[in-house]
Amino acid sequence: MIGRRRFLGAAAGSLALAACEAPSSSASHIGGGFEGIDMARGHALRDGSLAGKAPQESRRTRVVIAGGGVAGLAAARALRLAGIEDFVLLELEDEPGGNSRGTAVKGVPCPMGAHYLPVPGDDAREVQDLLEELGLRRRVAGRWEYDERHLCHSPQERLFFEGRWQEGLLPVQGVPAGTLAQYQRFDSLVESLRRREHFAIPMARSALGPGQLALDAQPFDAWLDQQGLDDPHLRWYLDYCCRDDYGAGSEAVSAWAGIHYFASRHGFHAPGSAADESPERDAVLTWAEGNGWLTRRLAEPLGAQRVLCGQVVMRISQGRSGVEVDVFDAGRRALVRWQAEHCIVALPIFLAARVVESPPDFLRRAAATLRHAPWLVANVHLGAPLADRPGAAPSWDNVLYGTRGLGYVDAGHQRLDPTPRETVISWYRPLGPSRHDAGIDGRRLLLERPWTAWRDELLAELSAAHPDLAGLATRIQITRYGHAMAIPAPGLLAQLGGRPQRLVREGRVAFAHADWSGYSIFEEAFSRGHWAGTAVAGRPAV
Ligand SMILES: Cc1cc2nc3c(=O)[nH]c(=O)nc-3n(C[C@H](O)[C@H](O)[C@H](O)COP(=O)(O)OP(=O)(O)OC[C@H]3O[C@@H](n4cnc5c(N)ncnc54)[C@H](O)[C@@H]3O)c2cc1C
């Protein structure tokens, strides 16, 4: 039962959210609903109704992979690369891919969650290998080139600011000289930290020295205050970046996370800086169905006999000679016991701690420490392209200054045929702690709010830039993620051990999930899956 104070806080938050919603009458023609996550399946684990029941059948394999997100799929690929074919991947939902699945609305493909992969840097060797294998990257005349069809087409991003669209996401049109000066100063600070410390993706390749641990110890906002970086436009942009990558605002994540976002990639680009002019800046790969393009390719070679969906992993127990994995097969409503030599637990940490019997101390501690941001993604089918406000042209990523949501990406942006036609726009709504959502309980809202309330919120928000949105929308499909991604809160790296470990393992059980990096992106999940699969196959990690 929730306490009165929390209830009042959540209720006040709901009212505040309700106040900014459009009247739903103008939207009543739009069909839609929730999709993608079977909450009852996920909660079967928590309610304990199946606990202690005897399995009805027993099966044997060499390796069980529990969880079929990016990490689980990467582990499966690593096993195959090592010549191991005798394994199963057990996935809760009806399709593997986890937060990186694709979907379609009225036949138009679109992302259900993750939608892009930045061109990987030199530390992300495992991801580079994958992209080569998939034909996305190849060496031409001594240089690496990426397949133009999958690099995000131009224009990539724009911001609706002061009633017009401007290119890029950093507010620049008409901002005062003081704002530009603070952009420059933040740029220089990131650059000097980048030279001094190695901020790597995947983070396990960082040398987490005292400098990075000092950043980890404090909130990003506090660090910015100390540097005298108080310009509201700069602060809006940095907060937006934190909500975009971590699902939580700049007051809730560590300064390490705030800096890592820029220093591990191509830096921060103050207008006019050398980095701002670089053609390499912000190159990203994207597809109509988002990173679902990648997860489908990872799943394809495994085949239906090895990827088993609708499987709720309930209990993992290791003995001296093997591992037992008890699973509820939701399709057949049967309890199955798998016997294996090894298990790779590619589940979020809080679930791993629940299903692994007698969890090791490091797992228990990590589960007690780590908090997850809830998220919501709404895919809106449009019968025709949106009319536009003045300024920069429609882009792949379209952000509105000062809103709770993160704007939208256009699933039709990568089409090679420019004929204007129906499309799907994907609205991203983080629900972790943030000053934009003071007093709300995001997870509870996800459980309790009807889909029409999210519809109205998104229409109210995006209509500022597109007044014709409600008229053109024909269907809205919404995916709710209760525990979408780890929040890299202050002190988290120190609490997770202070030393980035590539392989997290206890006997016959290896752990692989983006959570073990303290924040969630494709590269982290993929590398961890790869390392776990390689280790279980008995190969030295490179
Ligand atoms: C809305 C959203 C947008 C994002 N956008 C991006 C982006 O654009 N780019 C990017 O790089 N990253 C993005 N991310 C981060 C994304 O989380 C990672 O890229 C990656 O998909 C994480 O993979 P994972 O395997 O670590 O975790 P998960 O995706 O959490 O995979 C865990 C898997 O375990 C399954 N599972 C859970 N419980 C059980 C059980 N009991 N039994 C069996 N299976 C179970 C789940 O269904 C899931 O498939 C986004 C995340 C969200 C939520």
Image (tube, grey):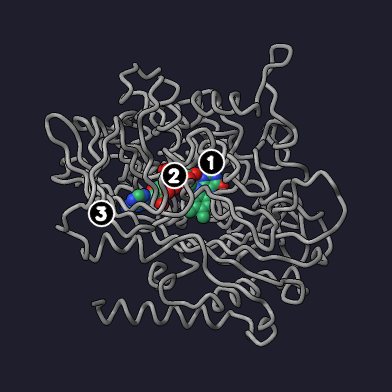
Pointer 2 local density, CA inside 10 Å: few below 14, some 14–19, many at least 20: many
x, y percent for residue 269: 65, 40
Q: Residue at x 41, y 57 (%)?
A: 373
In the rendered image, the vertical position of residue 14 relative to residue 294, given as above or below: below
Mark in front: 3 vs 1: 3
- Residue at 48% x, 42% y is 521
Give the farthest residue toward the right: 419
Residue 153 lies, with reference to residue 450, above or below; the image says: above
Q: Which mark is residue 274?
A: none
Label 3 – label 1 distance at C-alpha: 27 Å
Q: Which residue is mark 2?
A: 69
In this image, 164 relative to 127: left or right? right
- Label 2 to label 3: alpha-carbon separation: 22 Å
Across and down, in percent, residue 245 comes to 51, 49
Q: Is mark 1 within 8 Å of ligand 1?
A: yes
The residue type indicated by label 1 comes to Thr
Q: Is mark 2 within 8 Å of ligand 1?
A: yes
The label on residue 335 is 3
Give the position of the C terminus as an image quadrant. top left
Q: Secondary structure at mark 2?
A: loop
The mark that comes first in sequence, 3 or 1, is 1
Mark 2 vs mark 3, foreground winner is 3
Task: Answer left or right for 350 relative to 250.
Answer: left
